Amino acid sequence: MTTLSPETKTRNCQCENCICQKPIDKKTGFEVTDEFQRFNQKYDMFNRAAWDDEVRSDRVRKFFESYFTDLAEFRKVEGFQHRDYALRNAAWYIADFTADLLEKSDDRKEGFLDTYTMFREGATRKIDSTPEDNSKDLKRAAKFLGADAVGICEYDERWVYTHNYSREKLTDKPMDLPDDLPNVVVIANEMHHQTIETVPSALSGAATGQGYSKDIIAVLSITQYIRNLGYRAVASLNDTALSIPLAIQAGLGQYGRHGLLITPEFGPRVRIAKIFTDLPLTFDEPIDFGVTETCNVCRRCSDGCPVKAIPSDAPEFTDSMSNLKGVKKWTVDAKKCFKFWTNQGTDCSICIRVCPYNKDFSKFHNRILRWMMTNQLRHVALWLDKKLKYGERKKAGWWWSQSSA
């Protein structure tokens, strides 16, 4: 554990308690140095598209406009036709509707720039229960309310943004997350496997929208459940804090070469949400099922990325504007990645499609391959993954021809 000098704190560290390394880092594999800086939401690539001349362009504008279906550029090629954009935008509807609800009136883009506020008043009496029972009940309730996976970790200020951002005013906003909510509930929801197999396509973007929409229903319902127990709870999607480090600390998965959370149940095919709360809870332990060792020898995502935005070498530190500083990790070139998105007119998930962990693990033979990737048989598993043509792109017409989704 390292305590920084006041000079270093002023120059670099923005952590409230000025501790950049924490004991949990040994369990998660995070390597955080004294050069660490918390992230300002302004430098997120989607926000840079609003103010940064190096990012914004007519193509970027058309990309965002395509989520209004009449403004999308339909093509004759499979996956980018009218029906594909219609489904993608329908899948995004709940996420877009809740995000836009208070944007004009209150300058709040909830779920993407700001936390959610759409709740009833909770109970005035607090439940009389132990942290252990609260955690057990919470996880059961979370699954019932729509979470595919749920974990609990301690609040970690390192992953909370220094500022929120207003796209309406193009300025920073104060971070409004209370600093006395000690626990974080992290949930993940599966993205649809078959539509991901059609990446890149507008159709595959429906899996992303559906994942977010499922997250929103679950995170709002779970937050209201906690409030009904008499405790405070703040619901968050992509806003307010970095989801992946919190998910790893909550035991939901490990970090992959493609910069995504890899879960045992669904691989990288998930979307994440979190709840900050003062409900007394017990914490889950980070897990290790061989992801780091597998990613060290696997290059499926970096080889498959059309614009080479994913590193093919070892983890390293970065000074990129849109990435964390002072953390040693595999870092995706967000600018290259986003440019590919805007050029094709929809989001890209090729790295998810080709990932050896992107499988239907309800099938026994896929669970065998996952087990092989936990040990010295991982080279054989990766060879089989390629030999059996897992991760190869399927045409959108194949998905539309299925008897059911």
Image: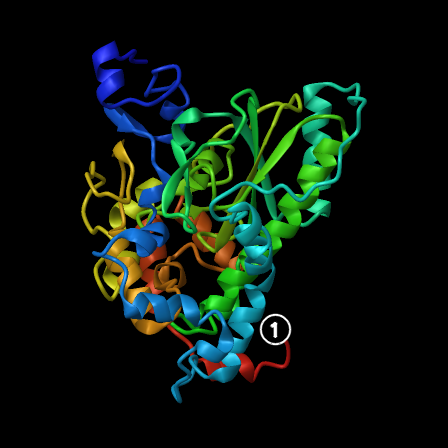
x, y percent for residue 29 = 34, 30
Q: Quadrant of residue 347?
A: bottom left
- Could you tell me which residue is drawn at 33 percent across and 73 percent down? 344
The C terminus - image quarter: bottom right
Q: Residues within 10 Å of mark 1 (few under 14, many from 20)?
A: few
Q: Quadrant of residue 128?
A: top right
Is any part of residue 389 visible from this angle? no
- Could you tell me which residue is drawn at 26 percent across and 45 percent down? 331
- Furthest toward the bottom, the residue is 76
Judge whether 132 appears above or below 402 on screen: above
Give the residue type that dot 1 points to: Ala
The foreground one among 49 and 290 is 49
Side of 29 where 358 appears, left or right: right
x, y percent for residue 404 = 64, 77
- Could you tell me which residue is drawn at 41 percent across and 32 percent down? 159
The foreground one among 188 and 111 is 111
Q: Quadrant of residue 386?
A: bottom left
The foreground one among 16 and 198 is 16
x, y percent for residue 304 = 27, 64
Q: Which residue is mark 1?
A: 405
Side of 326 where 78 appears, left or right: right
Please tell me whether mark 1 sits on a helix, a strand or a loop.
Answer: loop
Is any part of residue 129 visible from this angle? yes
